[in-house]
């Protein structure tokens, strides 16, 4: 399937690993220019080298910017004036009880998970509308629906993205710009791999068993009862970037293995 993305430009926040990195790989393979982002020179350089090696001759660039640091965000906005595709992927969480979650954690998670998307979209959206083509994609989480009690702050930030995306879709009315949400379920990114590794050593069981237990105890509602691969999630993001998704605007697409209960 030709995604017709050749020559287009994308920025993916928080993309030195996991879902963002895999999305960058797919979009570069389509002949796009892709800007990857992370907090340090080291991780950004490593991601750029990895992608250049994976897709020879690809046009990949790195931008270091920590969304908790205003001056770095300002530099990012100054260095990148327009893109055709904005993927608001960066997302941080901490597993803590509601009663023990400090105010700073709430503010930081809203700053990184929500405000990064607000600031970036505000910066790029007008250009997309003026050129009459663009894609804004927000990466949410199954936690919006599950709201695990140890992830209430994270789940709240992700829920905010749904209204943000819908509002932006309304601003795009009558144009070929779209704004959509992708809802991943538990996905085998580096964090999940570490979790399996550590738990398997601690409990002296195989990683397969740890995964089975996780879904039996922590993600009972999952229908697939396994982690999704980053490429399963990234393929859906890439589809929403493509021309083939042109009639989806203001929508929410789940890639959660069926964990978010309900028919609607
Ligand atoms: N993995 C899952 O199971 C899962 C499930 C549902 C939803 N999601 C969502 O999917 C998205 C991607 O998750 P992932 O698991 O693939 O991510 P990940 O592998 O944990 O990668 C996190 C990325 O975010 C960057 N980052 C972290 N804090 C940042 C900050 N303050 N400023 C700029 N960049 C920052 C990291 O870059 P550096 O380390 O280089 O700074 C890294 O590139 C997130 O929004 C997450 O909430 C993930």
Image (cartoon, rainbow, N blue to C red):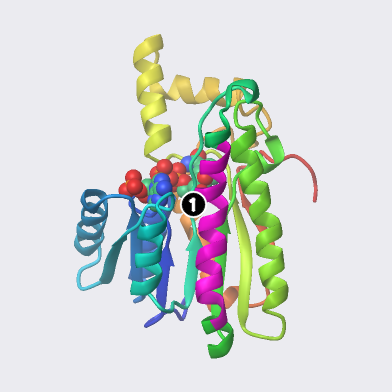
Q: Is residue 159 left or right of residue 238?
A: right
Identify which residue is drawn at 54% across, 24% down. 214
Identify which residue is drawn at 58% across, 38% down. 106
Image coordinates of residue 101 in percent, x first then y, are 58, 27
Image coordinates of residue 98 in percent, x first then y, are 64, 25
Quarter of image, res 207: top left
Quarter of image, res 27: bottom left
Range of magenta residues: 106-126
- Looking at the image, which is closer to me, 247 or 150? 150
Identify which residue is drawn at 21% across, 64% down. 52
Residue 250 can be seen in this image: no
Residue 91 can be seen in this image: yes
**Vertical position of residue 119 compared to residue 143: above or below:** below
Identify which residue is drawn at 43% across, 58% down. 13
Q: Which residue is mark 1?
A: 232
For the residue labelled by badge 1, is the local secondary structure a helix, a strand or a loop?
helix
Q: Is residue 122 magenta?
A: yes
**Vertical position of residue 98 compared to residue 136: above or below:** above
């Amino acid at each position: 399937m030709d995604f017709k993305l050749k020559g287009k430009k994308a920025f993916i926040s928080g993309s030195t690993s996991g879902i963002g990195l895999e999305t960058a790989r797919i979009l570069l393979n389509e002949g796009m220019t892709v800007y990857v982002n992370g907090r340090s020179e080291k991780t950004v350089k490593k991601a750029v080298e990895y992608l250049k090696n994976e897709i020879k001759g690809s046009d990949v660039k790195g931008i270091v910017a920590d969304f908790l640091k205003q001056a770095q965000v300002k530099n990012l906005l100054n260095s990148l004036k327009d893109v055709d595709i904005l993927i608001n992927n960066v997302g941080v969480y901490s597993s803590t009880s509601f009663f023990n979650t400090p105010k700073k954690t709430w503010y930081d998670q809203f700053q990184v998970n929500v405000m990064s998307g607000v600031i970036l979209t505000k910066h790029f959206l007008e250009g997309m509308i003026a050129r009459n083509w663009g894609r804004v994609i927000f990466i949410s989480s199954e936690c919006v629906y599950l709201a695990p009690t140890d992830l209430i702050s994270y789940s709240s930030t992700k829920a905010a993205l749904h209204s943000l995306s819908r509002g932006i879709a309304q601003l795009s009315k009558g144009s070929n710009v779209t704004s959509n949400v992708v809802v991943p379920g538990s996905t085998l990114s580096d964090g999940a791999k570490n979790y399996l590794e550590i738990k398997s050593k601690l409990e002296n069981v195989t990683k397969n068993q740890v995964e089975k237990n996780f879904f039996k105890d922590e993600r009972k509602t999952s229908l697939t009862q396994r982690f999704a691969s980053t490429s399963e999630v990234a393929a859906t993001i890439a589809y929403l970037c493509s021309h083939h998704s042109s009639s989806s605007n203001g929508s929410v697409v789940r890639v959660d293995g069926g964990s978010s209960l309900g028919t609607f």
